[in-house]
Amino acid sequence: MKKLLSILCFALVVVAFSSCKKEYITQASPNQTILFNVPTTAWTLSTDGKSYYAVISTPEIDSYFNDYGGVLAYFSFTTGVYEQIPEVYNGVSYSYTHNTGSVVLYAQSYDGGTPIVPAALTLKLLLLSSSN
């Protein structure tokens, strides 16, 4: 009787664990990384004279992406070194906004004084898709 009960318990354990199945779902990332060279000439003094701005055309940001995606911005003044915006660098405070079709970079003096013309830089945008 003990032998039959042991065989029955073993059979139940085998059946229980053999039905477990791990399933891995790999989803391709639709995220994008885009690099832009932003020369000094791309910056325009704002109408109030307190800051500079540069408009970067990004047709990848459509209306849907603008509402449901994410945009991260980094700049580089030296090859291979990126810093995330917002950031204060050499007395200039950098920030950005995005809307359908463009990213706007802003640069102003860190203390609100006389605006400093931003140097040429490389901009790296990471466009992160998200499902609604």
Image (cartoon, rainbow, N blue to C red):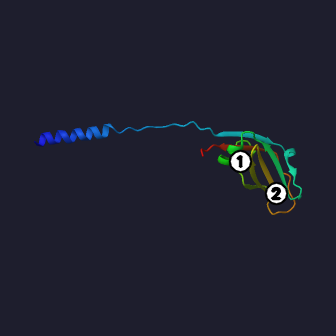
Q: Is residue 27 visible?
A: yes
| Kind of residue indicated by mark 1 | Tyr
Which quadrant is home to the N terminus? top left
Q: Which mark is residue 23?
A: none
Taking depth in this image into account, of 28 and 101 the one nearest to the observer is: 101
Query: Is residue 108 shown above or below 2?
Result: below
> For this view, does 55 lie left or right of residue 63?
right
Q: Secondary structure at mark 1?
A: strand
Q: Which residue is mark 2?
A: 108
Task: Estimate the x, y position of residue 132 in percent, counting from the top left.
Answer: 60, 46
Total label count? 2
Query: Is residue 106 shown above or below 9?
Result: below
Q: Residue furthest left?
A: 1
> For this view, does 34 lie left or right of residue 42?
left
Q: Is residue 118 visible?
A: no
Residue visible at 33% across and 37% down? 19
> For this view, does 3 lie left or right of residue 104?
left
> For this view, does 32 lie left or right of residue 16?
right
Mark 1 crowd level (few <14, some 14–19, many ≥20, 10 Å Cα): some
Task: Estimate the x, y position of residue 85 in percent, counting from the top left.
Answer: 72, 52
Residue visible at 15% across and 42% down? 5
Q: Which residue is mark 1?
A: 74
Task: Estimate the x, y position of residue 79 in percent, counting from the top left.
Answer: 73, 42
Task: Estimate the x, y position of residue 107 in percent, counting from the top left.
Answer: 80, 54
| Kind of residue indicated by mark 2 | Gln
Residue visible at 29% across and 40% down? 16
Q: Are marks 1 and 2 in contact (CB under 8 Å)?
A: no
Taking depth in this image into account, of 30 and 40 the one nearest to the observer is: 30
What separation in Å lies between label 1 and label 2 (alpha carbons)?
17 Å
Q: Secondary structure at mark 2?
A: strand
Residue visible at 79% across and 60% down? 110
N-term mark: 1 or 2: 1
